[in-house]
Amino acid sequence: MSQSLQLFTAYSRSPNLTVPTHSDLNPTHTRRFPVTVFPKLTLKASLSSSASSSSSDLDPSSSPVLVSGNGAGGVLSAATQAYAPPAVVSSDSSSIEVDSVKEAELKENGFRSTRRTKLVCTIGPTTCGFEQLEALAVGGMNVARINMCHGTRQWHRSVIERVRRLNEEKGFAVAIMMDTEGSEIHMGDLGGAPSAKAEDGEIWTFSVRTFDSNQPERTINVNYDGFAEDVKVGDELLVDGGMVRFEVIEKIGPDVKCKCTDPGLLLPRANLTFWRDGSVVRERNAMLPTISSKDWLDIDFGIAEGVDFIAISFVKSAEVITHLKSYIAARSRDSDIAVIAKIESIDSLKNLEEIILASDGAMVARGDLGAQIPLEQVPSVQQKIVQLCRQLNKPVIVASQLLESMIEYPTPTRAEVADVSEAVRQRADALMLSGESAMGQYPMKALAVLRSVSVRIEKWWREEKRHDPMELPDIGSSYSDNISEEICNSAAKMANNLGVDALFVYTKTGHMASLLSRCRPDCPIFAFTSTTSVRRRLNLQWGLIPFRLSFSDDMESNLNKTFSLLKARNLIKSGDLVIAVSDMLQSIQVMYVP
Ligand SMILES: Nc1ncnc2c1ncn2[C@@H]1O[C@H](COP(=O)(O)OP(=O)(O)O)[C@@H](O)[C@H]1O
Ligand SMILES: C=C(OP(=O)(O)O)C(=O)O
Ligand SMILES: [K+]
Ligand SMILES: [Mg+2]
């Protein structure tokens, strides 16, 4: 500690002091799996490597952008080479816990090349097994998402159990996000059929009636009772945001006759919107509860299972989030389940700032959003949400169709790579896979693409110093909070100016870690926290490498202990330059590792 330099110490003074439609363009007609299969040209030689080594997976300087291999196995084995034997998982107070994949990445490439953008994978039939989950974790999954629209609670419970077991046995810190169904209007189950083809000019009946086993031909059940009343003859009915289109031609009691105007494949439980005079119709369906009675039961399930995040679909106002948060606080043991607001409706855009302020994070849910606003508005809305979340210090996930074509194909389109790059460039906290990992043919490859594109783009923008500094407003509600913010802003700026190797933050609740993450510094942030649940939650935030470590209020001894533990594991070495902050002692320390 002889080389440590105490720059300043700002003790909290008085805790009582407080400082302060749619246009005429319809959504572009994109086809989704498996409507029409166009042969895809691939430029393997220029874009993917034939045999990827572990270091090329992780080190952007030496790797081609994409990882190739034959199916999941190829990518898994490539990634596994970098993955050290399971970390010693122990609650011994003298030990330190770090994600074993992150540990391998740090050892392999040093601090600078670690990935900052976090990755969320939706778990579905193709990834629910223990081995597939492990492969995803090894491939960089930070958060596993389960979507309560699909599957039974028993199925979801088994996924949660497997992820927990994986964390315990193999030293991962994969967090679990439960996503509610919400009161969207969707089709029924197609009488058990995997899909149904609607041809141009065909007449189909959409009905609020339910059918037991014998569903009449070309008849679709709709889950929303007010459907027949709300639609009008002449309305346009969009399946999945425009994958298939119908025109309403006649209403007969509970049945609505529609003519197919854009043919395509209908998938079970596909989302439905209806449009009139160029905008989405919100009649009584706008009054549907954000959290349905089924959602409340799912939320109880999520609380009982101790999930880390609950994502709420079709949030319309801040009140629903506030209400849910107090419900969780009253019921969950440590009330530490974070609530993520999914921004995917017109109302959520109207009340954006207050919704984000009330939440613990947000998701740009582009799937439904793109069915409710014109598609050409989605990119600017995405950028706005990402920026606002960073200003308000809430983690933000960019979701849906990032690598949609990889549901069927082993390489992404160039346009998809560009879309992923843009989200990384905007420095969203996390990117999410949906169908690509839930039911696609190449879940591991899709994850590998997110990983390699993230690392490459992050490095490129860091080297080019192309990031515009963002004005970060004061967000604290007390003077002490403001001090913490100033410390983090200054520490991050110093870290960039001095080119330090890492920022260290000792944090009980994770707040100081998120304040540092908000600054998006050039170096990674080692976040030390004493609880496993805080550590898992920090896994959603940009640039944070969360460690579990018991620490005291004495920074000197914390630092000494951390240095020796990390040195023993070859994660840092003498001479590395580190800046440390903590939420116990409001100070910034700059020092070389002794
Ligand atoms: N638990 C599950 N069981 C079965 N299929 C699932 C499950 N989760 C996701 N899927 C499949 O993956 C697709 C994409 O997932 P997601 O985007 O989360 O749902 P949605 O398409 O309903 O918005 C779903 O349409 C569904 O086909
Ligand atoms: C992520 C989304 O929500 P879900 O997959 O639950 O429809 C979305 O609509 O983009
Ligand atoms: K959902
Ligand atoms: Mg949605």
Image (tube, rainbow, N blue to C red):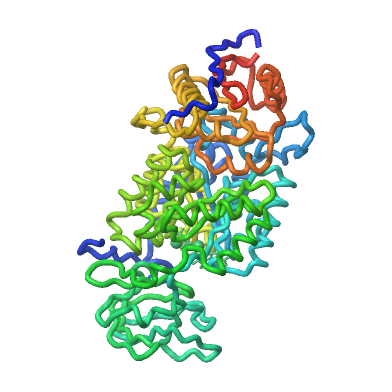
Horizontal side of 334 relative to 362 (left or right) equals right
Q: Quadrant of residue 589?
A: top right
Q: Quadrant of the C terminus?
A: top right
Residue 255, visible in the rendered structure = yes
Residue 381, image x, y percentages: 33, 50
Note whether 48 is above or below 205 in the view shown: above
Note whether 437 is above or below 449 in the view shown: below
Residue 165, image x, y percentages: 72, 52
Q: Name which residue lies at 46% across and 77% down.
A: 223
Q: Nearer the viewer, residue 303 or 398?
A: 303
Q: Name which residue lies at 52% across and 84% down.
A: 191
Horizontal side of 333 relative to 348 (left or right) equals right
Looking at this rendering, what residue extends furthest in the front direction? Answer: 16
Q: Nearer the viewer, residue 281 or 115?
A: 281
Number of disc labels: 0
Q: Name which residue lies at 49% across and 41% down.
A: 117
Q: Quadrant of residue 345?
A: bottom left
Residue 62, visible in the rendered structure = no
Residue 561, image x, y percentages: 71, 22
Note whether 357 is above or below 513 in the view shown: below
Looking at this rendering, what residue extends furthest in the left direction? Answer: 24
Looking at this rendering, what residue extends furthest in the right direction? Answer: 92
Q: Nearer the viewer, residue 538 or 267?
A: 538
Q: Nearer the viewer, residue 179 or 50?
A: 179
Q: Quadrant of the N terminus?
A: top right
Residue 576, image x, y percentages: 58, 18
